[in-house]
Amino acid sequence: MIKKNKKSRKKLKKQFAKKKLIDEIIRVDHAGEYGATKIYAGQIAVFGKNSKIGKTIQYMADQEQEHIQTFDKLIIKKRVRPTILMPVWNVAGFMLGVTTALMGKKAAMACTVAVEDVIGKHYEEQVKQLGKKEPDLKKIIIKFRNDELEHHDIGIEHDAEQTTGYNILSKFIKTGCRAAIAISKKI
């Protein structure tokens, strides 16, 4: 009887740990994709949809919209509480997009490169964490990681690294992204 109870507790702990991991992944990815849609919305507000750079940004924004719609569904399906910081990410994302766009096309692309570098690594870490768990979620994350890395490459192709103060801007944005990830996992 005691051995059976220990096995039951161990099994419950394992299930709880898996649920906690899945909740964190969905919560943080939902928040991140939401933030990305807001960054691009801010940039498009400055450049417009019909400018050459606006069309490039809109292409990436459309993919981010697909990502957020997917995580909107997963939040409901998996009964995951979204981060309470969504209003903060709304304003912060939009302001980051507007600010970098006002700095110029290269700075807007530098923002994309910095964000997508962090997100690509973040998604790769999640793929490793999932291992064989949740193969459908893992497949989604791999697809979205590939999209994000494509955005990174688009930014590089559009002279992101030629932005005045690129290293400082990139470090600032990457630090903000890492902080947002850490916070959104938990609250």
Image (cartoon, helix red, strand yellow):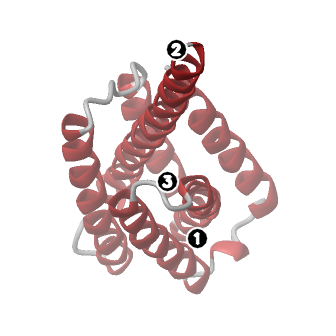
Please provide percent x and percent y for residue 164: 74, 64
Which is more toward the observer, 68 or 21?
21
- The amino acid type, in three-letter code, at marker 2 is Met
Where residue 34 appears, as percent x and y from the top left, is 35, 44
The residue singled out by tag 3 in the image is 102
Disc 1 versus disc 2: distance between alpha carbons?
Answer: 67 Å
Q: What's the CA distance linking mark 3 and mark 1?
A: 10 Å
> In the displayed structure, does residue 142 sit left or right of residue 6?
left
Residue 89 in the image: x percent, y percent?
43, 32
What amino acid type should be assigned to the residue bearing mark 1? Lys
**Residue 83 in the figure: left or right of residue 6:** left
User: Cβ–Cβ below 8 Å for labels 3 and 2?
Assistant: no
Does dot 2 land on a helix, a strand or a loop?
loop
- Mark toward the viewer: 3 or 2: 2
Q: Is residue 70 left or right of residue 136?
A: left
State the residue at coordinates (80%, 60%). 167
How far across and how far down the image is residue 51, in percent? 29, 75
SS assignment at label 3: helix
Q: Residue at x 56, y 63 (%)?
A: 116
Of labels 1 and 2, earlier in sequence is: 2
Of labels 3 and 2, earlier in sequence is 2
Question: Secondary structure beneath disc 1?
Answer: helix
| Rendering quarter of residue 155 | bottom right
Quarter of the image holding residue 109?
bottom right
Three-letter code for the amino acid on which mark 3 is drawn: Leu
Q: In the image, which is nearer the foreground, mark 3 or mark 1? A: 1
Could you classify mark 2 by the number of other residues whose Cα lies within 10 Å: few (under 14), some (14-19), or many (20 or more)? few
The vertical placement of 164 against 122, above or below, is below
